[in-house]
Image (spheres, rainbow, N blue to C red):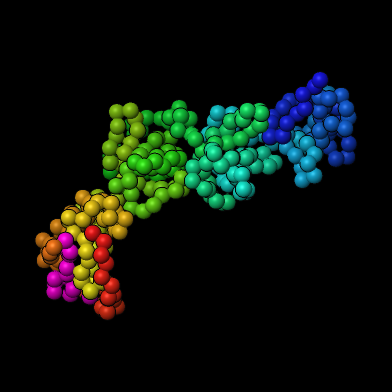
Amino acid sequence: MATALAENTIATLKVLRQSEQGAFLDGGTGNTNDDILLHRDQQTTPVIIGDEVTVFLYKDPKGRMTASMRLPAMSVGQIGYVEVINRTSFGCFVEVGTERGIFMPHAEMRGRPQVGEKVWVRLYEDKSGRLAVSMDVDDAMRRAAKPAEAAVLGSEIRGAIYNITAEGAFFITPERWLAFIHRSEMTRSLKVGEMVKARVTYKREDGRLNASMRPVKEAALVSDGDTLLTYLGQRNGRMPYSDKSASDIIKAKFGFSKAAFKRAIGHLMKDGLVYQEEGWTFLTDKGKEAFLKANDGNNAKGHHEEECER
């Protein structure tokens, strides 16, 4: 008995007959009711009776098997940066160049990509032979990557994130360089799939890069110091954080590392703008003047909240 053709698969089928709608392909069962329509609109080149054509099979809105000569833009095992075009309770569909999207089950997702977002995926065949995609692309990325020999320390690179772990985020650049941003080098939360810009901080022996979203230290001292000065000025010149505070609290509250916090605080103390006492940091009179000058008095009233995190 002939095996029925399945949707979301690629098959090479023979053209049996023509109609006003298009060409009918051999469904493989010997029953003309199972022949598959290749609509004229789904033909990338004209076909004639007797041709064997490679098509993507899918079901139309009425549940009928339909064929298209528009094949996926990538082969099984390859990766692509594609758009999410639909979400369901079971997963989502992504655009890969076919007449309809290719399914990605929840188990193959990293995070919860939304419609309109782009993500890195790998095309694969599931146990039933149907095409599907997965965001588990690490091995494929390593095979596709090139050594970052031309990368320059301190230069800016950009790319799309393909994985985020407890340690940080991994992304690939248009040059096919792989780069890693440690969590301490992030200036904000990141999502799998988003484009990111970062500065090259280290070229590894394996050809990959370490990168940072933070500016160079000299600039960071100013920007981080401004952040702390503004925070203090908006809270009556005091905050329950100091260089004795836990690093995870500092990261959650200000978005930068404990080391960066200590450098910025040290810079402010050296300039006579703040002082520390019993685990708290306070603005000096000079610091209050600096805050008012920077904000033109708009935030002079401050906030009357006393936070208790340490």
> Residue 209: percent from the left, percent from the top?
33, 36
Which span is picked out in magenta?
279-292
Which quadrant is home to the N terminus?
top right
Question: 20 or 35, which lies in front?
Answer: 35
Which quadrant is home to the C terminus?
bottom left
Q: Is residue 288 left or right of residue 87?
A: left
> Residue 36: percent from the left, percent from the top?
81, 33
> Residue 68: percent from the left, percent from the top?
73, 36
Residue 43 visible at all? no
Q: Residue furthest front?
A: 308
Query: In percent of the image, x 59 and y 40: which residue is there?
Result: 104
Q: Is residue 274 left or right of residue 16?
A: left
For residue 147, what is the image quadrant?
top left
Query: In percent of the image, x 80 and y 44: which residue is there?
Result: 62
Query: In percent of the image, x 41 and y 42: which residue is there?
Result: 164
Residue 291 falls inside the magenta stretch: yes
Question: 207 or 251, which lies in front?
Answer: 251
267 versus 301 height, above or below = above
Residue 176 falls inside the magenta stretch: no
Query: In percent of the image, x 87 and y 24: which residue is there?
Result: 30
229 versus 212 height, above or below = below
Q: Is residue 149 left or right of residue 96?
A: left
